Amino acid sequence: MHYLSRSVGPEEGAPVSVIQAVRPGRGVPGSSAPVGDRSKTAWRATGLLVAVLVLLAIALLSVAVGSKGIPLGTVVHELFHYDGSDDGVVIRSLRIPRTLLGLAVGAALGLAGALMQALTRNPLADPGLLGVNAGAAAAVVTGIGVLHLENPSGYVWFALAGAGIASVLVYLLGSRGRSAATPVRLALAGAAISAVLTAFISGLVLMDQTTFNDYRFWSVGALAGRNLSVLWQTGPFLLAGAIIALGLARPLNALALGEDTGRALGAHLGRTRGLGVVAITLLCGAATAAAGPIGFVGLTVPHMARGITGPDQRWVLPYSMVLAPILLLGSDIIGRVIARPGEIEVGIVTAFIGAPVFILLARRRRIAAL
């Protein structure tokens, strides 16, 4: 197996850091990592710690900022010594559930976006590419229009079911025939399923004004108006999806070297892609069920993470998991500040932030392959 340890040139499309991440013998007792690798690891770990501290500061601001501003000192006091005051009620019943939901949804969308781009090796891939968002939206519309569902907490199970069914259909369509479920086939199947479901949604909401009115508030994507029960319902799915996604970091590094080299390094292509689809379904389905479809977070954040860490998925995935809630909660705070005493839903703010980034990425003459 001497050929596995050789350097791979730029023409083979495999960054050296990725090769080192999957090279046999790394981490074996008695072996020592080069000084450059240790310093790079320390730098990445420090950057991740700084990102976590920034996230904690953003979360504190999310609790303090709103139509009613609350001093940070009062926020800290009410977090640890609840006294039943008006500020305490606002913090405990409204701000904390909203912030926790933003943390969970943001982490899920960032992790799903990084995983999607790594699986498809497409830097412009979005978690909605597999039809997950469209499936969740179609199920919610069906619940509202056909079953006359009125309680937003009931949308959760419809959205999760719709996301799961859409993902299964996409995977079955993408794996039909003699060839396996390649990234291109999965993307094409996802685009086809999304187009059909989008047409179904449009037809249903246009025929019933009441369905349209109920659906449009959910479809814009928002953290407001959700209580902790939504997080308890979706939390197990988010946790399971995150564990699966983080466990795929090393196989994804192997697949980045190419399918043949990935197999030689011990990566199982079918299992990795199958588990990746399951993780994306759980993460996107639960996040969409909890907060509605929120775009561009899963598209832009992985690019920020790779700009800091390089292509190694062992670092891209955790960074995306931390940076995404920073973007989501920051956008939510901006939406509360610029429209006082009202607010702009976070899905609209992230679209304004993410759309220019997407356009810049699409207009670049050369986009690095993943």
Image (spheres, rainbow, N blue to C red):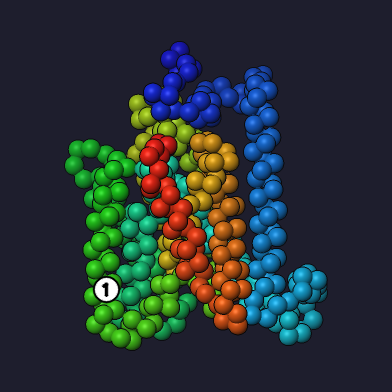
Say which of 133 and 278 sits in front.
133
- Within 10 Å of disc 1 (Cα), the crowding (few <14, some 14-19, many 20+) is few
Say which of 172 and 84 sits in front.
84
Q: Farthest residue in the left direction?
A: 177
Say which of 142 and 75 sits in front.
75
Examine the image and state in which quarter residue 59 appears.
Answer: bottom right
Residue lying at 70% horizontally and 77% vertically, measured from the top left: 69
Question: Does dot 1 land on a helix, a strand or a loop?
Answer: helix
Examine the image and state in which quarter residue 193 appears.
Answer: bottom left
Q: Position of residue 247 (x, y in %)?
A: 51, 42
Q: Is residue 120 above or below residue 196?
A: above
Residue lying at 56% horizontally and 71% vertically, measured from the top left: 335
Task: Specify the amino acid type for callout 1.
Answer: Ser
Quarter the C terminus occupies: top left
Residue occupied by mark 1: 202
Q: Is residue 128 left or right of residue 331?
A: left
Q: Position of residue 351 (x, y in %)?
A: 45, 63
- Looking at the image, can residue 149 be seen? no
Q: Is residue 179 above or below residue 189?
A: above
Q: Farthest residue in the top direction?
A: 2
Q: Position of residue 157 (x, y in %)?
A: 42, 70
Q: Position of residue 41 (x, y in %)?
A: 65, 33
- Looking at the image, can residue 37 be seen? yes
Residue lying at 34% horizontally and 39% vertically, measured from the top left: 270
Q: How many discs appear? A: 1
Say which of 249 and 300 sits in front.
300
Q: Is residue 99 above or below residue 112?
A: below
Residue lying at 69% horizontally and 67% vertically, measured from the top left: 61
Q: Is residue 61 left or right of residue 294?
A: right
Quarter the N terminus occupies: top left
Q: Is residue 260 above or below residue 220?
A: above
